[in-house]
Amino acid sequence: MSSTAKIRNGNSGDQRSAKELSLLLDLGRDLERSLDLRHALGPIMDKITRQLDWRRGALCISPREHGQANAQDTLEISSGLAPLRQGKNTWHFGKTVTGEVIRTGQALLIPHISRDRRFLRSRTARLGPPGHDLAVLCVPLRLDAQTIGALCAARITRDRPTLEHVLRLMTSIASMITDSVRLRREARVEAIQLKKENQRLQGQLENRFRPANMVGNSKGTRRACELIKEVAPTNTHVILLGERGTGKELAAHAIHFGGPRASKPFVAFNCAGLPTAMVERELFGYESGAVAGADTPRVGRIEMADGGTLFLDNIHELPESIQGKLLELLREQSVQRLGGDCPRHVDVRVIVSTNCDLEGQVKAGRFRKELHRRLSVFPIVLLPLRQRRSDILPLANFLVRQYGELYGKNVKRIATSAMDMLLSYGWPGNARELEQYIESAVQQSSDEVLHGHHFPPSIQTAQASGTELRGTLTDKLAAVESEIITDALKSSRGNVARAARELGVTERVMGLRVRRYAIDPKRFKLSHIRQRPMGSSRLG
């Protein structure tokens, strides 16, 4: 070859390399710019086909693992087709080279398709100009050791080194497309995980405070839930009436998070047992210098709740001098800090609670009549636990599951004798007292059952529960043995043999004990059908 020919060939090679490098840079920019890969790949395939002088090109991306792909769940883009053929499935999976590359994960080069049996009936064989044969090149798209698709091309046959060079260039293009697929999949997975986490946190927040989670099915609980659902979407001020421990703060949360202010602050303040000056500072805040030792201003609870809800517990203990300022807040929706010159506008919904007879306080002159009238627009009464005994067991089961998860205890149920104690007790502290006892019992438990001895003596005495054992030591031991056998039969669903194995005795001994204590195992065979699973009760 002459020097002139060498120079000409060298210049041609440099021009081809520069053209290919420019193509790769353009493809990188196109892939990076586009948010939707499906829409971007069509123009990209057309550009590759034009600049690399392909007769036809095809790109297939399958969401499944290699060997599992089919045409129905695949992104397929073809270029170089006639307008009437655009969008039609030309490069099928299966017996064609595309399917072979996807199954094997290996690149394929067919220099002359006219000599290949796989293309005897293919339209691709007729794409070449007269007197020229076509070559087919196909490279896999590999992602995390899996073949997710293939990039294929048909072009006029050239010498083997040229075709191998094109195959290497196609491998680089396939790698760029695969990287783009990976980034989009990772972003999609991250977005899904973030959405799930947000949903989980929002669900925890809503489940904690929505009325549907107020455990119990008694008439009083259902009525309270109905009123909460009715008033929550409004901005009406609410007063919650009930004894200590009946769940007034829980109800206040349910009202707040069930209404339009759910995304705004919920600020609680207990008015009980505080001096007047402290209550005033906490609620209304102060400017710098207004309070001894205060060098900087402080925002009060009312301003903190701006846009949201202010919950005042034990409102009957609010000092009389502060009641007038609270009334002004309800009238004007404004608050003035201690030492301040002008009132500040606030948008606050006020929910108050009391365990006291406010009407009696009004008659006695200890509570302002106008304030009572404004706060009592929508009263909700929360009954004590002793007046809704049907809620005790659902609430106890809910708390057992909750504290079992908290302390990592696999407690599944409450023993029958312990249930009797819970139902017989008067619960002066209401649901709050029950929660404290359940938490303590779960911490003490060493197996899957809460027994009577896990609860404090105050509910085990005859005066408190009516379950005290009377008689001789033999009678007391017999009662304990009967309780243990009953729990074992309940756990085994009435299967005497299984209960005997759990207690480490023979079936004969178990049978004798069952007859001695007149225990009917059959009643436990159906009890699991009627019994609702623990935690399935709705908190109310």
Image (spheres, helix red, strand yellow):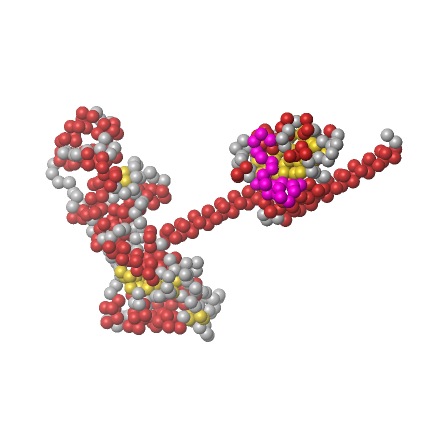
- Residue 280 locus on image (x, y percent): 38, 67
In the rendered picture of this protein, how many numbered marks are placed on residues?
0
Looking at the rendering, which quadrant does residue 80 occupy?
Answer: top right
Residue 270 seen in render: no
- Is residue 523 shown left or right of residue 263? left
Per the image, is 501 magenta? no
Residue 276 seen in render: yes
- Is residue 313 shown left or right of residue 180? left
Per the image, is 83 magenta? yes
Point out the image quarter for the N terminus.
Answer: top right
Does residue 307 sit above or below 389 in this rendering? below
- Which region of the structure is painted magenta? 75-96
Near-viewer residue (66 or 540): 66
Looking at the rendering, which quadrant does residue 521 occupy?
Answer: top left
Near-viewer residue (528 or 376): 528
Does residue 118 sit above or below 199 in this rendering? above
- Residue 291 locus on image (x, y percent): 43, 68
- Is residue 380 shown left or right of residue 92? left
- Residue 107 locus on image (x, y percent): 64, 30
- Residue 45 locus on image (x, y percent): 65, 42
Q: What main secondary structure does the magenta stretch of the protein show?
A: loop
Q: Residue at x 31, y 45 (%)?
A: 536
Q: Residue at x 27, y 60 (%)?
A: 381
Looking at the rendering, which quadrant does residue 100 occupy?
Answer: top right
Q: Residue at x 79, y 38 (%)?
A: 14
Q: Residue at x 39, y 60 (%)?
A: 259
Does residue 101 sit above or below 272 in this rendering? above
